[in-house]
Image (spheres, helix red, strand yellow):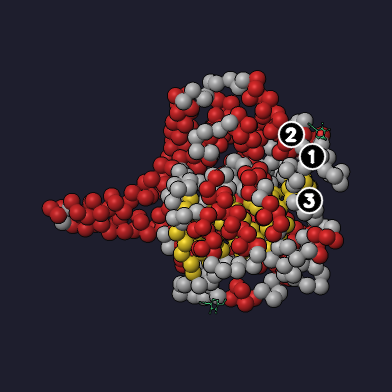
Amino acid sequence: MAKFLSRALTAVLVFSYGLFTLVLYGLIAVKNGTYFKRPTEKEELELQLARDRLWNLSEDFEGLSHHMLTLQSGFKFHFVANDKPNTPETINSDRPLVIFIHGFPDSWAIWRHILKSPSLRQAASLVAIDLPGYGGSESLDKYDATNVLEKLTELIITLRTEYGVDSSEESNKKRTIIVAHDWGCVLSMRLAAEAPALAHRFILSNGPIAKLVQANIRRILSTTKKMLGNAWRSPRHARVPLMQALRTLAPLGRQFFLSGYIFAMQMPVPFVLQFLTGGNYSLLKGVHLRASGGILTPYEAAEGMASSMGPSVAEFKSKTASGDTYPATLENERAFAHVMHMAGYYRDHASVARWVKSIETVASLHSISSGSELRHSSSGAGLFDEGPTGALKASSTIFWGQQDIALDQRICLDGMNDFLVNDSQIVLLPRTGHWTPVEPESRAALIKVVEWAAQGEQGDVGTVIQKSYPGAKVTVRR
Ligand SMILES: *[C@@H]1O[C@H](CO)[C@@H](O)[C@H](O)[C@H]1NC(C)=O
Ligand SMILES: *[C@@H]1O[C@H](CO)[C@@H](O)[C@H](O)[C@H]1NC(C)=O
Ligand SMILES: *[C@@H]1O[C@H](CO)[C@@H](O)[C@H](O)[C@H]1NC(C)=O
């Protein structure tokens, strides 16, 4: 009975806070005049053009071509790349493979600025994927950890073969680098913790390690409890411990306030649809506006929305050079409810739920880890060699915009050192917010970091970053 009551109470609280957020965001959009604003003819045309630019499979985007990859399990992924997969030139070249993984509410196209870099294209084979349920990739019924991470792992292993990292004779013939942002970062942190053989370096931007966040919340709550206990025991001297308790709680309170949208995503479907698409997508439009620092040309605004919305019915008719099309199931479903797939990652707990690896996954991870045991043998601090649960076991570069309006740095990064292995860094970017792949200063620095990783990590990454981003703080774990 007590259990039932506490569960019911939790559900009521989650719903109430979600509803509060929905109404609050709606009112803000009304106040800003975006909620009832009808798109002009020019804006509609721009959106159509942007969707054609980003999603027409028969056209290159600035020299990047579209590809569909069907996994052994039958699941279809969409990605864009500078080098064609599975050709002798690509497989035999010694350029490393860099895989870019986007977050919410984006697609491969959040990397479009970075992918244009000529020096980066020269340095590596660049592959930018759409996560399941996003852009042109197929959807899942449920976005729990096992479903999502199994698909992602199979994709990465297949890409490694098609880009010549592994062959049937030899593994790790060249480097693989995973670059990820937001939800892509959350998922990639799980890969770095639970399948570290997938890449030689993970570059991870503005997404939390769920286990570290949980540990920080527990720590804050238990410290606060102690201080409140002190205040309770000696009421006459309660002021100091009460103030301390408030100060300790502040980051948690801030994160709770910033996380309102996560609660909104837990509500019943009609509410979530209203939240994500109400006012003609005023929320997503607001996200893209913020990402660009508050100013957007109609061209850029349309590209942002086209990145979120994926292909339209028109682009479903297009074909890649090799005759592939988008998954047939998408055409009907994406038109209206595609945002529910994005919300699925929040609703089905992909960040914390257990990943039950299939036998096939375990076998393929084993086969690509040959010759790389040394790399993963040393791990972070902690009582055991394994480090705390959720600790990353591959070399990682945490690339963090400190002005993030979705993630409190103290909640997400305090204690991070214990979650990192040898050869990892934390890069703090004081003038950057959440959207590191989009904001001009951080995206230039990100290009440099990826180049550094692709070119074999010569020299000090701190020097490389500080040259393109003065004031960036780099702490290194060796
Ligand atoms: C919403 O936006 C789309 C695309 O810009 C447009 O075609 C449609 O008319 C808009 N609907 C409303 C109710 O403003
Ligand atoms: C996609 O591009 C092809 C080739 O340029 C063009 O013929 C086709 O009309 C385009 N499709 C759409 C929906 O614009
Ligand atoms: C880190 O790696 C270097 C070589 O890459 C090695 O010499 C050193 O012992 C390692 N440190 C730890 C703590 O494992």
Is residue 271 in view from this perspective? no
Q: Is residue 203 above or below residue 22?
A: below
- Left or right of residue 244, residue 261 in this image: right
- Give coordinates of residue 247: x percent, y percent: 29, 51
Asked which quadrant contains residue 95, the reply is bottom right
Residue at numbered disc 1: 59
What amino acid type is highlighted by mark number 1?
Glu
Asked which quadrant contains residue 49, the reply is top right
Asked which quadrant contains residue 314, the reply is top right
Residue 6: numbered disc: none
Disc 1 residue crowd, few under 14, some 14–19, many 20+, Cα 10 Å: some
* Cα separation between marks 3 and 2: 21 Å
Residue 69: numbered disc: 3
Whether the residue under disc 2 has CB within 8 Å of ligand 2: yes
What amino acid type is highlighted by mark number 2?
Asp
Contact between labelled residues 2 and 1, with CB atoms less than 8 Å apart: yes
Residue at numbered disc 2: 52
- Give coordinates of residue 283: x percent, y percent: 53, 32
**Pick the front one: 298 or 267:** 298
SS assignment at label 2: helix
Q: Earlier in the sequence, mark 1 or mark 2?
A: 2
**Pick the front one: 172 or 427:** 427
What amino acid type is highlighted by mark number 3?
Leu
